[in-house]
Image: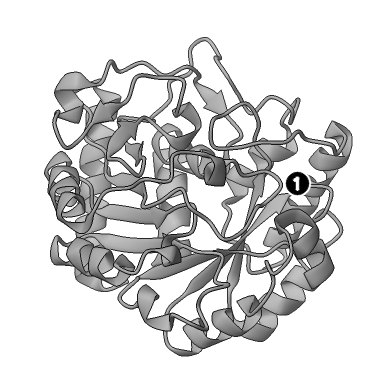
Amino acid sequence: MRFAEKVALGYAYGTSLLAWMVDGPPRPFSATFAVTNRCNLRCSYCNCPSLDPTHLDLARVDVLFDRLRALGVRRLGLAGGEPMLRRDLPDMIAAAKRRGLWVSVNSNLTLFARHPGRLAGADLVYTSLDGEEDAHVAARGDGAHDGVLDAIGRLVRGGTPVIAICVVTEHSTTQLPALFRQADALGFRLHFQPQCTDAEIVRGAVTVPNDALRAFWRELVAEKRRGRPIVSSTAYLETLAAWDDFGVSAYTEPGTRCAAGHGFLYVDPLGRAHPCAYTKGKTAPVDLLADDWRATWSRDTPCTRCSVGPMLEFNLLFQRPLASALASARTYG
């Protein structure tokens, strides 16, 4: 990340944090935009391919990016579904960069060999990796591993950093040695997140016992302290190592505030904004092409505490700002 980008992103986060602390008008510094629900895979825990397959055309994406930039957003994640199914993905990345946004893309990378140019311009690529091929395919389906490691290697050698997301399920809890070996060989880093339940964008149930999952997260804390290439923050890993019931991904805890909608938000493929991806289908959306988030959003969330990977990390940025911001700067800077 260039120095000017660090300054701009840091200023946006600081402004967002201040607005949240004084309970002022929402000023999200980060947004995730699902560019499509369509996907070429059928992962066992993801429901996106069964949702509405329609999405915004590029002209309306331009309008959306203007609205996000006006809100204060400086970090934009492009997700799906599978973003690389959209031929105009490079145009979207370029449009976001013209507005001074720092851009990441979440892709399973199975289409990279055919369309490497579709990730051109991305500042960071997130992908999916659950261990050796058999474990990865068991969770994500036939063809899910095809070309992924080669794509990661090509991206890293070309100067694009890659973070592989491992969803912690019965298929991946035995895969740490393989994941660390692959990360060290190819030069990527790892983020771990629990399998989520009870949301429109997910499916399936957690089958690993809670005590076994807590032991796995404690092992990750120890591995991070040993210097393994884990980008998940220590506070995040420790929170999950103490999580009571992984069958409950979110709940309301009295006295706890959630920063969703204030510091970050989620936008579905039709431009409808939600406080976060987990709240899709649980709160009334705001059409960002027609309405202003600050004036229209109810400022309500159905929960205040969660184990949902990205949202937990974002919430830590607001609940423990100094330690979490320093950890984030070391990870992504």
Most foreground residue, 57 or 64: 57
Against 291, residue 110 (above or below) is: below
Where residue 278 appears, as percent x and y from the top left, is: 50, 32
Q: What residue is at 71 percent from the left and 47 percent from the top?
A: 44
Judged left or right of residue 98, residue 322 is right
Q: Is residue 33 visible?
A: yes
Against 41, residue 20 (above or below) is: above
Total labels: the figure holds 1
Against 272, residue 8 (above or below) is: below
Q: Secondary structure at mark 1?
A: helix
The three-letter code of the residue at mark 1 reads Trp
Residue indicated by mark 1: 217
Quarter of the view holding residue 223: bottom right
Where residue 333 appears, as percent x and y from the top left, is: 38, 67
Most foreground residue, 2 or 64: 64
Quarter of the view holding residue 232: bottom right
